[in-house]
Amino acid sequence: MIRAITPVATLLLGVAILLTGQGLQGVLLPVRATLENFSPMAVGFIGATYFLGFTFGCWKGPELIRRAGHVRVFAAMTALASASPLLHGFWVNLWSWGVLRLVTGFCFAVLYVVIESWLNERSTNENRGQVFSAYILINMTVLAVGQQMLLLKDPQQLDLFALISVLVSLAAVPVLMSRSESPRQIEETRVDFRRLYRTSPAGMLGSLASGLANGSFWALAPVFTVAYSSDVSLSAWFMTACVLGGAAGQFPLGWLSDRIDRRGVLASIALGSVVLGVLMWLLATHMAVPGLLALAFLWGALAFPIYSISAAHANDRAEPETYVMVSSGLLLMYGLGAIVGPFIASAFMTVANAGALFLYTAIVHALLGLYVWLRSLRRVPSGPEHHTEFNDALTAVITASQVYEEEQQHSGKDKKT
């Protein structure tokens, strides 16, 4: 693996610094909003605006890159993303934070497009899996590190916002100074949702359900932990437990789905997430912290891989010429769910209590699991389903790697023909 990642080491270093800041920002803002007495609905709104900006960035980012080039766009987006957390610290109110999170989501989506297309350009079919495995491992590790940085300073002061700004700014240095050749221009892709549904209803709706549940988690889980305990450090530990659980569950579940019907695995982990969500809702306030963190780890181990397995199932059924459309469509379905989800989840929390966040995710997962199970009973396969190699897409909650990996492979096939 070391030999495979050596050509992209500076890019991966930039990613590590960038996502450390992203991890801290993701947990700091909901905690600070809760301490400022923002309502759950307001925190949900702030979380949804990030994914709105992210979805828009996935849609329009390639156009920016075609106009200005990868390096210039990366520098511009880094500058905007670095200024945003400082402005959060200066202007603590709902509407300014909503606008700033929308800008941040847009910037990060475009940054991921640049970085990941660059990684694809510098990898080959023989080592791409190793390169992206290293990329995903770095993502999960530094997200957890960033979340733990919440414990360094008082979240009600400007210090942590300034630290995020510094980290995002420093991320540009290794990327802009890299000697790696800039990637080729990204081709425009159009998403056909009707065709996507015909290709893989389970994959499309699994991606939507993952966005509905996971988007709400990222936006509102710190609100849940602050309601559980006034100790702010719990938010960092809780988020880290979920992320580490997601990383731990990804590979064994992906391995299993490579060997049996993916729909069976998808339905099973969705229904398992229902059980864990209900337990979190009913028992969280009666449990000691170690028990709560154990449940969080298990919930992440089942809930986060839902997108990955949904994407793998969709690509199993896709024709080679539709890979880009399918991958783009799945990511956009995730983003749309992540926009809507925090609003619905925050309504649950307002009517009931903070633990109702996980009642909401349980309902989403129950509907998905029931649909996939019924679909698997009714559908008669038209022919043998050939599994594509499982592609770890855990970071789809924050990245667009699946889209651009498939795009580069597709472009390569076009050139060969």
Image (cartoon, helix red, strand yellow):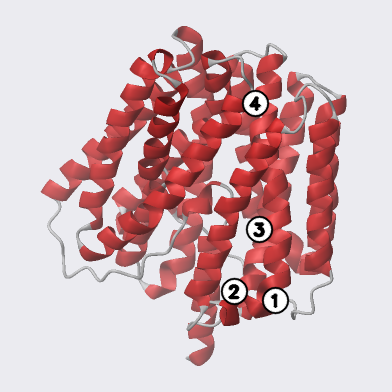
Contact, mark 3 vs mark 2 (Cβ under 8 Å) = no
Q: Nearer the viewer, residue 228 or 92?
A: 228
Residue labelled with disc 3: 112
Residue, x 81% and y 60% (percent of image)? Answer: 172
Of the residues shown, which amino acid type is indicated by label 1? Answer: Pro
Report x, y in % for residue 381: 15, 61
Residue labelled with disc 1: 183
Q: Give the mark toward the camera: 4 or 2.
A: 4
Q: Is residue 388 visible?
A: yes
Q: Earlier in the sequence, mark 3 or mark 1?
A: 3
Calculate the distance from the C-alpha at mark 4 to the C-alpha at mark 3. 23 Å
Report x, y in % for residue 108: 69, 50
Label 1: few (<14), some or many (≥20) within 10 Å? some
Report x, y in % for residue 285: 42, 13
Q: Classify residue 375 as left or right of residue 149.
A: left
Q: From this view, report whether residue 349 is shown above or below residue 273.
A: above
Residue labelled with disc 2: 120
